[in-house]
Amino acid sequence: MQPLQKLALLLLLSCSTSIISAQTYLNLDFETMSGNQIRRWVTLNNAAVYTLDSVEKVSGNYSYKISKTNPNEKRDAFFSNILPPALVKGKDIILKGRIKTDIKEKAEAGLFLVAYDKIGKPIQFDDMAGKRIDHTSSWQEVSISAKIDSNAAIISIGGACYGGALTAWFDNFELFIDGKKYISPVPRTAALTKNELEVLKKYCYPLESSDPNIETNTDLSILKKLTKDARIISLGESSHGSSEIFKMKHRIIKYLSQHDTFNMLAFEANMPESNTLNKAILDQQFDQVNLIKTLYLWPWHTTEIRNLLNWVQDFNQGKPKIEFAGFDMQFYKGAIEEVKKALQTNTDIQKDLYEFEYFISTIAYQYINQKGKVSLPVEQMHRTTQLHTQVKTAIQKSDKTGTEKDWLLQNMRILEQYVDHKIGDGNPEEKRDRYMAENLLWLLDNRPDPKIIVWAHNGHISKSNKTIDKGFIDSQMRMGGYIADSIPGKSLAIGFTFYDGSYTAMDPNDIKPFPAVTAFPGTYEHFLNQMDEPSFILDLKKIKANKPVELDWLLSTLPFRIVGANKQDIEFQDTNIADAFDYLIFIKTSTNSHLLD
């Protein structure tokens, strides 16, 4: 049971951001690839070698093969797929599959089904214990069945090999829901027709360049129409390391600041540290390297971001000005320092603050060194809550102005968010999105007439609240969804993606450039590349409203590039971009962002 519990944790903590619908291609016959990876299926560990086999098979072109040949490998080997909760919750399901085995020592092979609640606790489990194939065998049909609990948030199915050395082949999985076989939609890979391209072109606005220093901006004039009435415009990115995406966002920020009344640039960066950086920019004291690095995360330690913030500083020599802000809450140090400095003359509260900081640093240490497993004794958690309340009371009783008090109380709120993110119940990624939205809305409420441009990953700006691929929580809301619900009709989400090229990312050993997987047939990017435009804005909002039959494929769930700060083995995940974004900016070729020395 333990390895499958780990699988739930991996699914819950993954930072991928794809959106999935009930009518989803499940690839139950193992026939479709996403680049160099089998589509939809993921492996739990490297306890075996997982490959497709074109020789041993029941139907189609391939079976899925697990080779577990190392006699010293004691771990079990799993591969998994996630069923959309909306498809199977509260229903009777049967999973059938065919398995062939070649067993060298005591070992078993079988199917499994596990259902988890919203915090990753298993609430249903069947791994065919006592019914697995435990001997060398030709192809056999096996099955498991269950009535899926209505509280299930993740429903994981798959195949597994237990025990010693063996080779097992899996093929021809079938899913029956309330007695009816699930017929998976067939993914489209054929090129767009001439008519489809002509219709698509009606919803595209070509862009001249991603260069923020280009002199003409006629191509961006469409933004005045598209962004009308918006108070928050979120600019996403499919990778945290694409130079062209960063530069295109820089260009758009310049345009919206110069030709509209947008007066705040808010980053996916820690809130107190960003406030310090903003003061330096306003004082014309922006340090090109050192202050950027106070933002912690390496994607902001780049030439592209340095150039952007240098432009912000230059722009602020005149009027109007742009305020730089952050809305993230992943680090505690800046917030505690802000409060300690503001209350430095209050010796009694300083003692409370240092004790409070000790408890938070203990949580931070555990989170880093125990890989997310954080626990404090009940009495310490009670004391932490007590100290938090005492410091807030001291702030409210202090002689600070109303604005100063509001900012200090917001820092205390960030500390509260930080603790709950690290130690509270629930999905940490869902909570982070909720807290980032809360902090953005705080900026909207605590600045005079703000119009905010948001800089964040595609996943965070997504407006969709549907279940997402790889088993994310049913109805999990992203930051963009919270914002859209809070200020209806006043926010826009502009996603970004690219067809081929490279990006900067972090692997276990280094931060460096990596070649991007070229978008393959069936992906949004492959279809959009057929427009033969180097870059353009795609009006998803209008397509979704008009629903032209020629663009049904675009309104469906297709593979879409999703890369964060880390190198991804699987770069494309099933997504519905029309649910996630109002507009999408497509760039043909990306190059890697450039790290500062």
Image (spheres, helix red, strand yellow):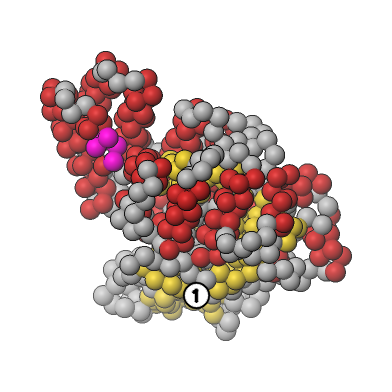
Which residue appears at 41% of the width and 75% of the height?
49
Closest to the observer, 538 or 119: 538
Which residue appears at 39% of the width and 71% of the height?
512
Q: State whether residue 395 appears in this view.
A: yes
Residue 184: image x %, image y %? Answer: 68, 59
- Label the magenta part by its dominant secondary structure: helix
Closest to the observer, 562 or 379: 562
Type of amino acid at the residue the image marks with label 1? Pro
Which residue appears at 60% of the width and 53% of the height?
252
Which residue appears at 51% of the width and 48% of the height?
315
Q: Which residue is mark 1?
A: 515
Left or right, residue 155 beside residue 326: right
Q: Secondary structure at mark 1?
A: strand
Mark 1 Cα shell of 10 Å, populated few (<14), some (14-19), many (≥20): few
- Identity of the residue furthest to the right in this view: 195
Closest to the observer, 297 or 574: 297
Stretch in magenta: 334-338
Please determine whether, in this image, residue 459 is positioned above or below residue 185: above
Looking at the rendering, which quadrant does residue 273 occupy? top left
Q: State whether residue 125 appears in this view.
A: no
Quadrant location of the C terminus?
A: bottom left
